[in-house]
Image (spheres, grey):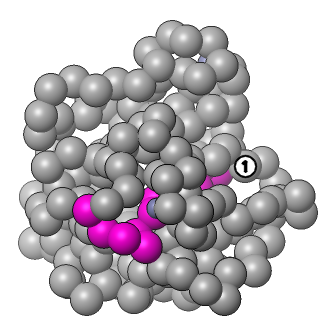
Amino acid sequence: MLLIDGGKAADDAPGLRTGGVPLVPDEFVWPTCRECGGPMLFFAHLPLDWGVVAVFLCQNNPGLCDDWDATAGANRAFVFHGPLSAATVPAEGETRLGAVTALRPRPADTPTEEPVLGRLGGEPDWLQGDETPDCPSCATPMTFTAAFKEGAEFETAANFGGGGLGYVFHCRPCDQAAFLWQR
Ligand SMILES: [Zn+2]
Ligand SMILES: [Zn+2]
């Protein structure tokens, strides 16, 4: 499925979106970057039929922290199960995108005039070599979940190096998710 620009969404919208506020369980602690120590930026809310994946990456010092790397500690992808509610956003740091954008799944073989902002399921379109991460729990290659472009507008886009793609993976048996980007 392609992910089509579905226009603006509420900060805490339950559907697939980039930006806004993450929906989290009670025990959630906002992730910090292992490299710079700052709070990460919430990038995407990705509800799946078995859980919700929430993607964060460090944008406090663009280009300095290795937020492109699945294991460097400068990004984080969580798997959450309900009940979930809107998180309290830290007061300091680059924690939010400039806009909330709904993403609507659309079959890839359907012609569309609307901007394509990503892909859900199927196989990843690698811009560089295959970097499928291994699950941190069971060490088997993770399953591709979704890919995201940076966003439609510069002011509100994530920074994947300028024209990059962000990739989300999961391991359902282990309740793990991972994120990386390439350009
Ligand atoms: Zn950082
Ligand atoms: Zn696993």
Q: Of residues 44 and 106, which is closer to you in this image?
A: 44
Ligand 2 lies under 8 Å from the Cβ of mark 1:
no
- Horizontal and vertical percent for residue 124? 25, 34
In the rendering, at what x and y percent does residue 162 appear?
Answer: 13, 65
**Is residue 129 in the magenta section?**
no
Which amino acid type is shown beneath numbered disc 1?
Answer: Phe
Q: Residue at x 36, y 41 (%)?
A: 69
Residue 68 visible to the viewer: yes
> Of residues 81 and 28, which is closer to you in this image?
28
The image quadrant in which ligand 2 is located: top right
**Mark 1: few/some/many CA within 10 Å (<14, 14-19, 20+):** some
Quarter residue 180 falls in: top left
- Left or right of 49 on screen, residue 162: left
Residue 158 appears at what percent x and percent y? 31, 70
User: Is residue 120 at all visible to an observer of this figure?
Assistant: no
Q: State whether residue 2 is above or below residue 92.
A: above
In the rendered view, does 20 fall on the left or right side of 147? right
Q: Is residue 56 located in the magenta-colored stretch of the structure? A: yes
Q: Is residue 97 left or right of residue 128?
A: right
Residue 121 as seen in the image, left or right of residue 163: right
Image quarter of residue 50: top right
* Residue at image coords 39%, 88%: 98
Percent position of residue 148, x then y: 30, 56
The segment highlighted magenta reads 52-63
Q: Residue at x 69, y 23 (%)?
A: 174
Instruction: In the rendered view, tell whether residue 96 sits above or below residue 109.
Output: below
Q: Which residue is mark 1?
A: 80
